[in-house]
Image: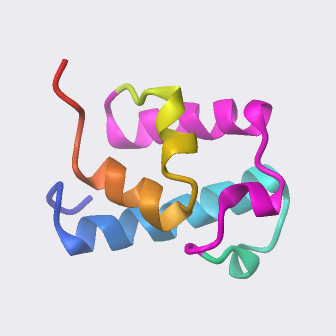
Amino acid sequence: MSLPGTNTARTDLCEWLCVQLAKELRLPPATIDPDEPMVTYGLDSLTAAAILAVVEQHVGFKVDPNALWDHPTAAAFAGFLAAGPAAD
């Protein structure tokens, strides 16, 4: 993974996140628009929990479950993740 906070990190995370979302929702990855709200594709609380588990494993830190709803597009969520773990 690229350095946290960089445009490359955001881009890499966004691409990876779109693929993971497509897998979880059983959609072709090319159909996921990173600027479209993820709920448009059928993201619900159950799917969100599954995505968060994969995301946390990939990024190596715990993610507040509300962050997925606070950053509703793959691009916005990837930007949030690229910033790194929030200070407690």
Q: Nearer the viewer, residue 1 or 10?
A: 10
Magenta stretch contains residue 21: no
Residue 79, placed above or below residue 28: above
**Number of callouts:** 0
Please tell me which residue is depicted at 35% across the width and 42% down the height of the picture.
Answer: 59
**Foreground residue among 15 and 68:** 68
Q: Is residue 45 left or right of residue 19?
A: right
Q: Is residue 41 left or right of residue 57?
A: right
Instruction: Please indicate whether residue 44 sits to the left or right of residue 6 in the image.
Output: right
Magenta portion: prevailing SS class: helix
Residue at point 78%, 63% (across, down):
40
Whole-percent x, y for residue 29 in the image: 70, 73
In the image, farthest residue toward the bottom: 30
Q: Quadrant of residue 13?
A: bottom left
Q: Residue at x 70, y 82 (%)?
A: 30
Percent x, y for residue 21? 67, 56
- Its colouring scheme is rainbow
Task: Give residue 68's position: percent from left, percent from top.
Answer: 54, 42
Screen quadrant of the C terminus: top left
70 lies left or right of 49 = left
Residue, x 26% and y 58% (percent of image)? Answer: 1
Q: Position of residue 64 (x, y in %)?
A: 44, 27
Q: Considering depth in this image, is 30 or 75 the residue closer to the camera?
A: 75
Specify start and end residues of the magenta stretch as a single range.
34-61
Residue 55 drawn in magenta: yes
Find the residue positioned furthest to the front.
70
